[in-house]
Image (cartoon, helix red, strand yellow):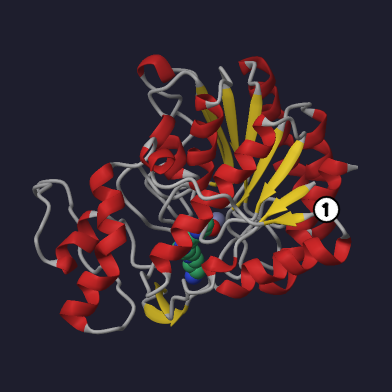
Amino acid sequence: MITVYSDDHVGHDGKAELHDGKLVPSFEMPRRAALVLARVQETGLGPVMPPKLFGLDPVRRVHAADYVAFLEGAWDAWVAEHGPWDALPFTWIAPGMRRVVPDHIDGKLGYYSFDAGTPITAGTWRAVRAAADVALTGAELIVRGERGAFALCRPPGHHAHRACYGGYCFFNNAAIAAQALRDAGAERVAVLDIDCHHGNGTQDIFYDRGDVLFVSLHADPVQEYPYFLGFADETGTGAGEGANANYPLPFGTDFAAWSEALAHALARIAAFGAEALVVSLGVDTFKGDPISRFRLDSPDYTAIGERLAAAGLPTLFVMEGGYAVEAIGLNAVNVLQGFRA
Ligand code: SP5
Ligand code: ZN
């Protein structure tokens, strides 16, 4: 299986996120991608190639133009106001307030985000562009006939909505790839999100569309971030009615229970008649993950890969979360090896 990877993520290096009331070192760090790449290389999974450059047009197929322009200029605007320390928002729009774009960078950060865990740093713009190119290059491999490909994206993407960032995500790499597959001629595309957190951004981007099925297995939002989306009664709207399926699972979920939900998810995907599958591959379902509460173990990821292969669809894997850094390479590449076997 070909892996697509760019070093351009390394300059996205947040110092801290708001966690349990304290600013703590960012869980989402450059070493995550470095260790996944190292595991790809040491296992001989297959060749590693750099991304092609696609520009911003395919990004704007799923993200609002004003949001993309905001991200491009956010760091410079922040530095001009506050100096070269990571940019974090501290206030957001709540019901009863007005959705007006502020002039001030502090207001803009709140307007275009939904949490205080997602710093913008000097290298963020370069990194998020590269991650989109990595996903788009992976999608192109699938269009050209590869059975599977791995987009080793960083930062991750599935929490990013059409016009806001959060959850360590800026551009929704999986959504950009799914849209690119549609634009290349696939009539129906499925996105399966197996990150421990609900893929709120991806769901929202495709919620009113019947051509992209979104299916997600995740920690129940009554207990876990992102809290405000990901419930089982969210089934899509308008033309998208029936093209969204959430499987919220409780804290402590082990592979037996998770696996049962996966069977339901794969049945939904089969019934949908997708021509291609995008997997939002988070491995923060691991029992050793420092911010999540599921109990999957490393060999389970190989079994997941085998199950995904049995779906028989051309499959693009897009890297999402996973914060047990010492095990992230093993767990992520186990999925890919299980798929390849
Ligand atoms: C891509 C991805 O996996 N993003 C995850 C973002 C999660 N950020 C907030 C996590 C909050 C976890 N709460 C744990 C509380 C422990 N006391
Ligand atoms: Zn996650």
Quarter of the picture holding the C terminus: top right
Is residue 301 among what the camera can see? no
Q: Nearer the viewer, residue 322 or 108?
A: 108
**Residue 283 is drawn in which quadrant?**
bottom right
- The image shows residue 89 at horizontal and vertical percentages of 26, 68
The answer to which image quadrant residue 136 occupies is top right
Name the element at disc 1.
loop
Residue 267 is situated, as x and y percent measured from the top left of the image, at: 70, 23
**Taking 250 as reference, is 335 left or right?**
right
Q: Is residue 270 visible?
A: yes
Relative placement, left or right, of 281 versus 119 is right
Q: Is residue 49 left or right of residue 13?
A: right
* Tally of numbered tags: 1
Q: Which residue is mark 1?
A: 46
Q: Residue at x 27, y 49 (%)?
A: 67
Residue ranking furthest to the right: 341
What residue lies at 38% left-to-right and 23% top-to-bottom?
A: 208
Q: Residues within 10 Å of mark 1 (few under 14, many from 20)?
A: some
Q: Return the x and y of residue 11 as percentages of the image width and height.
A: 48, 74
What residue is drawn where x is 72% and y is 52%? 3
Question: Under 8 Å from ligand 1: the CB of mark 1?
Answer: no
Residue at horizontal 74%, vertical 57%? 48
Callout 1, which amino acid?
Gly
Percent across and percent down for residue 158 are 49, 48
Residue in front for this viewpoint, 32 or 200:
32
> Would residue 114 appear left or right of 58 to someone viewing this image?
left
